[in-house]
Image (cartoon, helix red, strand yellow):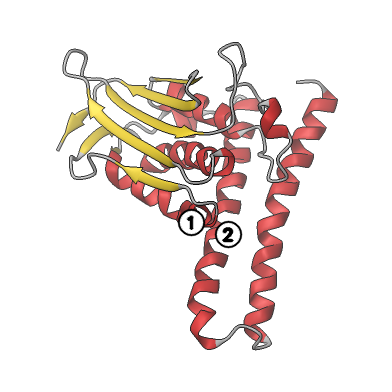
């Protein structure tokens, strides 16, 4: 990235962090001055927490990116001593986007949630990947559709395969969707534009911490599919 691209990326990330934080401040002000009626206080607090979680996720993305940019990736590449239970990690990641999904009429649906598929690796890292992809699916998804998440162990290879399928903004197979700062042309027109960093972080984490692969495609039928493949998956 040249200096101009770096500055635009920082500007975009800053904008994305300021908006939810401003929302939290506004909510707290309304709670303090009594503007919010008693029966809506819990709902507003839940929304404020979700906004804070989103901001933390965004800052964590920037932190991961900074580690790799400076060559200090030890904390990511040495995370294999832990175990991630996939359905649990997906559910915990999805909960931060349930309200936004309801507002845009996009339902997040996890299949095979009772099958405890696992991989070796830090749950927080994999949850960051899931949050980034779910964020994309809800932000750029089409109203009235579902974001369907599946996970299974491929018998022939023992690879854990996780897919995210939804109707969203298109991109072509020639697009470098995992490059730093990438956003599809159609997505650039959205006011809730992303940082252009999330999918790049997904690639770094999947390849370096889990020694796997991540891919994305947009079909002729208008379905966007992200697939994560991680070796040595197992079921509890």
Determine the residue positioned at 55% across, 30% down: 199
Residue 34 lies left or right of residue 221; in this view the side is right
Which comes before the other along the chain, label 1 or label 2? 2
Seen in the picture, residue 48 relative to 200 is either above or below; the reply is below
Instruction: Give the number of callouts.
Output: 2
Left or right: where 33 falls relative to 170: right
56 lies above or below 183? below
Kindly tell me whether residue 99 is visible in this rendering. Answer: yes
Q: Residue 70 falls in which quadrant of the image?
A: top right
- Image x and y of residue 201, in percent: 55, 31
The percent coordinates of residue 100 (x first, y second) are 53, 54
Residue occupied by mark 1: 102
Regarding mark 1 in the picture, which secondary structure is present there? helix
Q: Who's the residue at 60% across and 24% down the image?
A: 71
The residue at 35%/37% (across/down) is 149
Q: Quadrant of residue 233?
A: top left
Tag in front: 1 or 2: 1
C-alpha gap between disc 1 and disc 2: 18 Å
The image quadrant where one finds the C terminus is: top left
Place residue 121 in its image quadrant: top left
Residue 70 seen anywhere in this rendered image of the structure: no
Residue closest to the eye, 146 or 60: 146
| Residue 119 or residue 54, whichever sits in front | 54
Residue 234 spot, x, y in % from top left = 19, 29
- Residue 46 to residue 117: above or below: below
Q: Which residue is mark 2?
A: 52
Label 2 neighbour load within 10 Å: few <14, some 14-19, many 20+ = some
Q: Residue furthest right?
A: 4
Find numbered disc 2 in the image and state the secondary structure of the residue it sits on.
helix
Depth check, front residue: 212 or 142: 142
């Amino acid at each position: 990235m040249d200096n101009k691209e770096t500055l635009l990326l920082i500007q975009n990330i800053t904008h994305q962090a300021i908006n939810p934080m401003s929302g939290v401040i506004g909510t707290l002000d309304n709670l303090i001055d009594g503007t919010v009626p008693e029966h809506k206080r819990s709902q507003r607090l839940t929304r404020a927490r979700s906004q804070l979680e989103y901001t933390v996720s965004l800052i964590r993305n920037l932190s991961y990116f900074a580690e790799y940019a400076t060559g200090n990736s030890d904390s990511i590449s040495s995370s294999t001593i832990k175990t991630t239970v996939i359905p649990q990690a997906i559910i915990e990641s999805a909960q931060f986007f349930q309200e936004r999904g309801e507002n845009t009429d996009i339902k997040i649906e996890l299949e095979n949630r009772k099958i405890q598929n696992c991989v070796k690796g830090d749950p927080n890292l994999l949850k960051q990947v899931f949050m980034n992809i779910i964020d994309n699916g809800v932000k750029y998804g089409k109203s009235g559709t579902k974001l369907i998440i599946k996970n299974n162990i491929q018998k022939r290879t023992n690879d854990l395969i996780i897919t995210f399928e939804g109707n969203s903004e298109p991109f072509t197979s020639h697009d470098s969707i995992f490059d730093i700062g990438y956003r599809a042309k159609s997505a650039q027109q959205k006011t809730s534009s992303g940082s252009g960093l999330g999918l790049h972080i997904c690639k770094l984490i999947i390849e370096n911490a889990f020694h796997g692969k991540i891919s994305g495609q947009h079909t002729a039928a208008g379905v966007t599919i992200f697939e994560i493949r991680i070796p040595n998956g197992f079921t509890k």
